[in-house]
Amino acid sequence: MQTTLWYDNYQGAVYPLDLHAAPAIGRFNRKPTPSLLEICSKFIVRDSNLTLYAVHCVPKDLRVCLMKEALKENKDRAIEVLISSWHMESLVLRDLTPNIFTSLQPLHDTYYLSDIVRQGLRYTTCLAHTFLECVKKKMPTELRFLDMSGYPTAEVILYYLATHCMLAHNEARQTAMVNMYNTAIKYLPTSRTSMHADNSLPESVLVIKLDAFVTSDQTHAELCKALKVSGFPESKLRLCIEKLDATCLGEPKITILLKQIDKRTLKGIRLKYNSLTCDEFVKMEPELRTFQNLTALDLSCNTIHLYQNDTVCERMSETLASLPQLTRIDLSNNRIKNRLRHILQNMNQSLRYLRLSGCGLTNLDLTYLAHSHHASGLQELDISENTLSGCARSLGQLFSSAGSSLCVFEAEDTKLNDEVWLMLTHYLLNLKKLLYMNIAENNFGAITLKNFLQVFASLPEVTTVRIPYCRECYHLDETTTDDQISMRKMQFIVDLHGAADQVRGQQKDRLKIVANDLSRIDMEHISI
């Protein structure tokens, strides 16, 4: 369960994907030809002794190139050597490594998603631990500001940093008391021995900026104390949070944590799986309004049922309208039925990312979205796990309104049938910017999917589609075997690729088709 939650964190509103970039890591990454400088740096960081020798020989500016290759190749010892003699006061991780949240691959490939999360964890884990160890060992580093934001930080590392923040605060208090004692004894008539404070951290201020992932009470308590003392002027080690992911904590602990965070720096909040109710949201929302630089808010998988509570609906509308930078929202699995207009209409800015999976959306909600000021700016829209079989007209209007901006559209498990989807196929031609579509877990026939692919493949920007296997693949009789079903699936994919290739010709890259089994549909009730 914890592993599932961990990877699910990086597939939503708080961590945006660069949809037009190539995959950043792994076998999908098409690496350009390295420069001579990159080749030499890669060779040097292979061995930490060679790195140590090179640090004192090469110009200081080349240490940046060495750090880039050390991070890329996960050379922990070389990273330690470079940090221990870092020549600048700041080190910003995003300037040294490529953005790992790129391409459409994480949307449909969980293995690739786990790969990029693990790579991000390697970066932050190594840098955080190495930096503090160099500081405690009094290494001659000039580094005073470490920025690891934009990459996942393991909870154990967050706890490690929070405890050291408290340690630095306690040492600062001890030093202040020792200095007061030494000053006082100078005026006493009898001679007394002066005291000496042996601190493990330097006198200059150190700042670590990161994304916090909190699930346990122990980490929550330690982080709250660390953030509290980070605001004190005498603190020597300070934590700065850019993105907060608080899971399985509950409203009281979340509210306490939000009060400790610097209002100017926080840009993303994810409060998934906290069992938040309407009343608890009302208690918490005054704190949410204080984060004026917030760009992403995820309240998914709670029990904020707005369709039965006009008061809370109004409070949420006021909260969203009070956040001028907010462009990414996830309200999935909260009941919104017929209330989407009330929630979003007061926002001045247009949303770029909106996820409303499992919200009980109705035709009224989709009609509002199609005619709202958000439609013209939406780049990613997920309305999966809603019953859309009676919303053909409003969906068509939505495709027409959002066609100039929409890049990702997901409607997985939405009870769409052949008749509705054939009606919508014509409206697909409006989606000029579409890159990816997900209509998996819907019960379609082979003819419907083939007709859809012929139109879909003609779109100018599209690269990937996720679809279900057609229901004919699962037709059973007394002689049907598993091998025969597998052969039907293979032939189905071959036929679809043939139809798509015929439309696209040789001028475009081949359309990527990701087909999935109908796992959420009772196969015994599928009719041919």
Image (cartoon, rainbow, N blue to C red):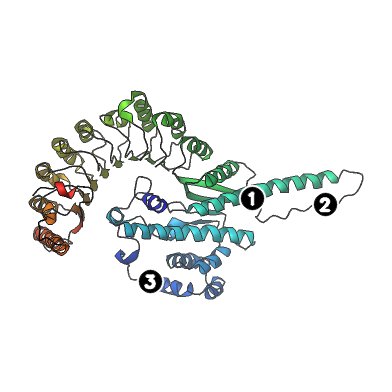
Q: Is residue 489 left or right of residue 133?
A: left
Residue beneath disc 1? 167
Which element carries disc 1, helix, strand or loop? helix
Q: Which mark is residue 483?
A: none
Q: Is residue 461 visible?
A: no
Q: Which residue type carries mark 3?
A: Ser
The answer for how far apart the CA atoms under marks 1 and 3 are is 44 Å
| Circle 1 residues within 10 Å: few <14, some 14–19, many ≥20 | some
As drawn, 160 above or below 73 = above
Nearer to us in this view, 29 or 422: 422
Nearer to us in this view, 526 or 149: 526
The answer for how far apart the CA atoms under marks 3 and 2 are is 59 Å
Residue beneath disc 2? 194
Residue with the most extreme front position = 478
Q: Which residue type carries mark 2?
A: Ser
Q: Is residue 190 visible?
A: yes
Q: Residue at x 32, y 39 (%)?
A: 333
Q: Residue at x 77, y 44 (%)?
A: 180
As drawn, 280 above or below 172 = above
Going from the N terminus, do you reach mark 3 or mark 2 first?
3
Going from the N terminus, do you reach mark 1 or mark 3 first?
3
Label 2 close to label 1 by CB (< 8 Å)? no
Q: Which residue type carries mark 1?
A: Leu
Quadrant for residue 35, please give it: bottom left
Residue beneath disc 3? 35
Going from the N terminus, do you reach mark 2 or mark 1 first?
1
Q: Residue at x 31, y 30 (%)?
A: 343
Which element carries disc 3, helix, strand or loop? loop
Which element carries disc 2, helix, strand or loop? loop
As drawn, 276 above or below 88 = above
Quadrant for residue 390, please give it: top left
| Circle 2 residues within 10 Å: few <14, some 14–19, many ≥20 | few
